[in-house]
Amino acid sequence: MVEGVVAVAAVKKLYNSPNWIEKLPVLGVGIGFRKSLKKAILTHRKSIDFLEIIADQYIEPSLFQQMELRNLRRFFPLIPHSLGLSLASADSLNNSYLKEVASIVRAVQPPWWSDHISMTRTGPLDIGHLAPVPFTYEFVRVVQDNIREMKKTIATPLILENISYTHAFLNEISEGLFIKEIVERSDCGILLDLMNLYANSRNHGYNPYQFLEEIPLERVVQIHVIGGHLEHGLIVDSHSSATPAEVWNLLRFVAKRVQIKALLLEWDVQFPNFDIILNELSIAKEILNGIDAFTNG
Amino acid sequence: MESMPSQTAKLQELLASIYLSSDERNNYFGNPQESAQAYGLCSATLDQIGKTQRESIDFYAKSLKRKRFQEIAQFIPTTMRFWNTSLKANFDSYAEKCIPSGPKKHIADLISFSHYLTNQDQLPSEAKDYLKFELIPWDMNFTLNEKEYIYKSSGTRVRIVGAHRCNGWNFKMIFYRTGLSRLMRRSKMSSLGIYLKLPYLSKSLEWYLPFLRTGPAYSLEESN
């Protein structure tokens, strides 16, 4: 208990310092914890530096899940990743959901946690997944207000993920500028999902490197990489295949410019042989360490 | 003049409704101005979604349904293995009528979809039996050094496991479904437990299905 209080106090102190992102620990490369990968993850734990857990799966946890989290914590740093905070909802936060996420963050004591710049519900309607909002200053203010409220409950640093979207609106500003405004006004880090960026750039015809020039790269804490699939001419971020070359190239671009604290392979469905996952992790590690053939060639 | 935050909330309400309901989508793309009025949106706010293509919204709506279906499919793997196509077809019409919410929304979705299915005549009775079977919660009986621990699961836990014996430890775990344990008590076999392993699951089901069909051992309500 005392250990927990000390850890929370340390996190608060860190978050209040001006260059808190620089002071975050470097975790290395990890994967998303999925039940079907559990055995392989534990077998190959020396090749995996950290795990990301889906916070929503541990809401009102069963005895098994509490034990599972405790056991995983013995072997890996855990980063909670929530899906349903709906930070872009104009009708304020869902307090009971926020409290549940807070209790998971308290239990896991991570250096940071993450959610998305999106809405998942509005009023009584639960959309059930991440939905985009128009990139306007009004929505910057909505997200900013919600993060201010959220920080009253969770002191651990929040990093925000860019989402993929199949439909776009009439935007006031570019997506890069929208994210920049939100993270700078709210003093948050960025969880840069490079597959989402690649899919959006292909589906909506823009230059992903321009997006990377627009966002404050120094705020990038964590990266997501993975592959998707093509459906009706659109790239779908289905987390179901190996990372495409274009995404690795985006990672090289970012890794040359900032120190990435953590990189996560976000494989969710159609799991391959675990050797393929380990190979992806080793490619990522080489890029982060600046020793891959393409970076040096 | 209405405040901007209020318009933003209304815009999101309209967006959510067109994502979730094909009727709302038809109404909106049939006459955007009328839909906007119904949601109390001014034309300036409506302009933000004015040029969004119908196809891309349809694509997103379809992906929302597919994700919901995938979430519940993992809880009923055996039923899914045999009746995937008919369940998918039923889910499309069900998903329009029922939208779950809350932290355990996938469980709520599964339960209400099961209720929906029980009223569908086109679904074979075998499929309904399998579904009932998979919706019954697991019990776990855990024995360590002669002490017995009983873990009763809540909701619909569908963990396929085996019984384990570790050398040197007096350690035994038995997992079984409440409904089956009840059946066994009726047939005076409760001391046996059931050792389910994935490859044998189908066989176990085949053996028990006659009981499920003939005896009113439990109903879907009991598994909630």
Image (tube, coloured by chain):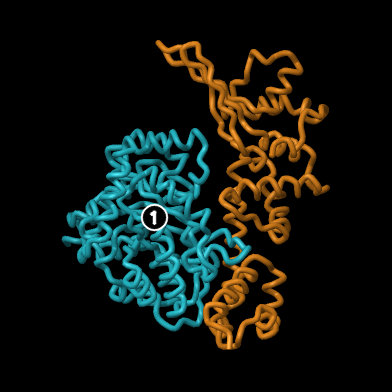
Chain colours: A cyan, B orange
A228 relative to A170, above or below? above
- The part of the image, by quadrant, that contains residue B62 is bottom right
| Residue A230, visible in the rendered structure | no
| Residue B190, visible in the rendered structure | yes
Q: Nearer the viewer, residue A73 or A162?
A: A73
The chain carrying label 1 is A
Q: Residue A130, how many percent across, how many down? A: 51, 62
> Can you say which quadrant of the picture contains the C terminus of chain B?
top right
Q: Is residue A151 left or right of residue B84?
A: left
Tally of numbered discs: 1
- The residue indicated by pointer 1 is A154
In percent of the image, x 61 and y 76: which residue is there?
B54
Q: Residue B115, how many percent across, how many down? A: 75, 46
Q: Is residue A256 left or right of residue B10?
A: left
Q: Is residue B215 left or right of residue B66?
A: right
Q: Nearer the viewer, residue A135 or B38?
A: B38
Q: Is residue A219 left or right of residue A226?
A: left
In percent of the image, x 33 and y 48: which residue is there?
A110
B134 relative to A120, above or below? above
Q: Residue A271, how many percent across, how many down? A: 45, 45
In percent of the image, x 36 and y 57: which residue is there?
A225
> Can you say which quadrant of the picture contains the N terminus of chain B?
bottom right
B28 relative to A23, above or below? below
In percent of the image, x 81 and y 29: which residue is there?
B216
- The part of the image, by quadrant, that contains residue B36 is bottom right
- Label 1 sits on a secondary structure element that is loop
Q: Residues within 10 Å of mark 1 (few under 14, many from 20)?
A: many
Amino acid identity at mark 1? Ile
Q: Residue B117, how many percent across, how many down? A: 76, 47
